[in-house]
Image (cartoon, grey):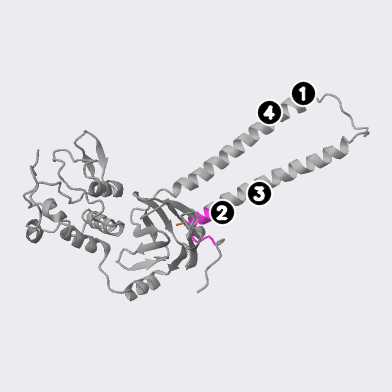
């Protein structure tokens, strides 16, 4: 399959960006043309030795016209600012039902995990006309995911999640590159964004090697890492109940109230002493170094699934097999 030109606009947002670009280019071109012809005209008319009149201009010209065109251009540019800013801001409103695809960058490749569990390297398959939200992080240095045909670019940072979202409106194979110099092989850190019709995407997903979806893989990790030993409702160690945690407002011991988003869940696993939940002792051990970025994404996908209506919504009840493995934590009780 050949890769489409990066000039292709493959989403409505991309077309909006193009419209803004061409409007600005046209206005700039017209103004450049006007200024250039005035320079040429005036240099001819007022060349040395010409008999053109060089006296004081009437007030009407030197003041009224001056104020007039200054005000007119001010409003023109305010309008352009408003128009372009409104388009840009619309790119921040993620559709609530967006499909989530996880992207982990590392020197020098993009590792991608589909919601169904399929893995890809340097390729992202997405269905057409479905909002897609990319949840991205890096294992080493700063990378930058650039989807030229979507007119989107976002830094991908170690230790943080960043996001991009788009709704592809055109199927095809498009460029995907790293747009931040990230080391020797930065230039090979490229791949393909494959936009397929919904039936084709479903067929492609089915053809992938059997894999559990992300949330189920996360659930398995939640048990094997021993999280369920403390966080199950029936556990004797009182750790915060994680049912419906994602998106909820969480009151903290120091009086702050934070929203449990991806960043909060990530920090709670890696830096548990940072945001201690009100009413609980800071006894959770840090899992920094014990879980990889991929595993973190799975754990977070599992925690998110506990907030989705229709899913089990209960952390594994069968905690007996893991609870016994947990080291007895000193003073592990509610304050
Ligand atoms: Cu990754 Cu440049």
Cα separation, mark 2 vs mark 4, equals: 32 Å
Cα separation, mark 2 vs mark 1, equals: 42 Å
Task: Give how far across and how far down residue 247 sits, in percent.
Answer: 26, 47
Q: Residues within 10 Å of mark 2 (few under 14, many from 20)?
A: some
Highlighted magenta segment, given as a residue range: 8-16
Q: How many numbered discs? A: 4
Cα separation, mark 1 vs mark 4, equals: 11 Å
* Mark in front: 4 vs 3: 3
In the depicted structure, whether residue 56 falls above or below residue 121: above
- Image marks 2 and 1: residues in contact by CB distance under 8 Å: no
Residue 59: which disc? 1
Label 4 belongs to which residue?
Answer: 67
Task: Give how far across and how far down residue 35 sits, in percent.
Answer: 74, 41
> Which residue is located at x 57 percent, y 49 percent?
20
- Image marks 3 and 1: residues in contact by CB distance under 8 Å: no
* Mark in front: 3 vs 1: 3
Residue 26: which disc? 3
Label 2 belongs to which residue?
Answer: 18
Left or right relative to 61: residue 313: left
Q: Label 3, secondary structure: give it.
A: helix
Does the magenta segment cover residue 257?
no
Q: Label 2, secondary structure: give it.
A: helix
Q: Residues within 10 Å of mark 1 (few under 14, many from 20)?
A: few
Q: Residue furthest bottom?
A: 207
Q: Label 4, secondary structure: give it.
A: helix
Sequence-wise first label, 3 or 1: 3
In the depicted structure, whether residue 323 falls above or below residue 247: below
Cα separation, mark 3 vs mark 1, equals: 32 Å
Residue 246 can be seen in this image: no
């Amino acid at each position: 399959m050949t890769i489409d030109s990066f000039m292709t606009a493959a989403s409505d947002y991309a077309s909006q960006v193009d419209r803004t670009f061409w409007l600005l280019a046209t206005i700039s071109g017209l103004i450049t043309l006007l200024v250039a012809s005035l320079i040429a005209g005036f240099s001819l008319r007022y060349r040395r030795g010409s008999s053109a009149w060089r006296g004081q201009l009437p007030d009407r010209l030197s003041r009224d016209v001056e104020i007039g065109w200054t005000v007119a251009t001010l409003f023109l540019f305010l309008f352009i600012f408003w128009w372009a800013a409104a388009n840009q801001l619309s790119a921040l409103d993620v559709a609530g039902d967006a499909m989530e695809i996880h992207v982990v960058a590392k020197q020098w490749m993009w590792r991608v995990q589909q919601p169904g569990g399929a893995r890809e390297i340097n390729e992202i398959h997405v269905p057409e006309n479905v909002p897609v939200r990319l949840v991205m992080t890096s294992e080493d240095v700063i990378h930058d995911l650039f989807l030229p045909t979507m007119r989107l670019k976002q830094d991908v940072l170690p230790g943080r999640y960043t996001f991009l979202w788009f709704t592809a409106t055109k199927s095809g194979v498009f460029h995907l590159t790293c747009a931040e110099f990230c080391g020797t092989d930065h230039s090979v850190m490229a791949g393909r964004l494959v936009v397929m019709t919904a039936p084709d995407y479903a067929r492609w997903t089915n053809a992938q090697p059997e894999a559990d979806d992300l949330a189920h893989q996360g659930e398995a990790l939640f048990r094997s890492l021993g999280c369920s030993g403390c966080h199950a409702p029936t556990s004797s160690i009182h750790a915060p109940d994680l049912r419906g945690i994602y998106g909820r407002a969480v009151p903290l011991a120091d009086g702050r109230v934070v929203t449990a988003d991806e960043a909060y869940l990530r920090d709670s696993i890696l830096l548990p002493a940072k945001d201690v939940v009100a009413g609980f002792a800071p006894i959770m051990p840090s899992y920094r170094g014990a879980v990889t970025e991929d595993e973190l994404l799975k754990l977070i996908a599992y925690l998110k699934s506990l907030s989705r209506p229709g899913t089990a919504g209960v952390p594994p009840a069968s905690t007996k097999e893991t609870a016994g493995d947990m080291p007895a934590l000193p003073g592990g009780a509610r304050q």
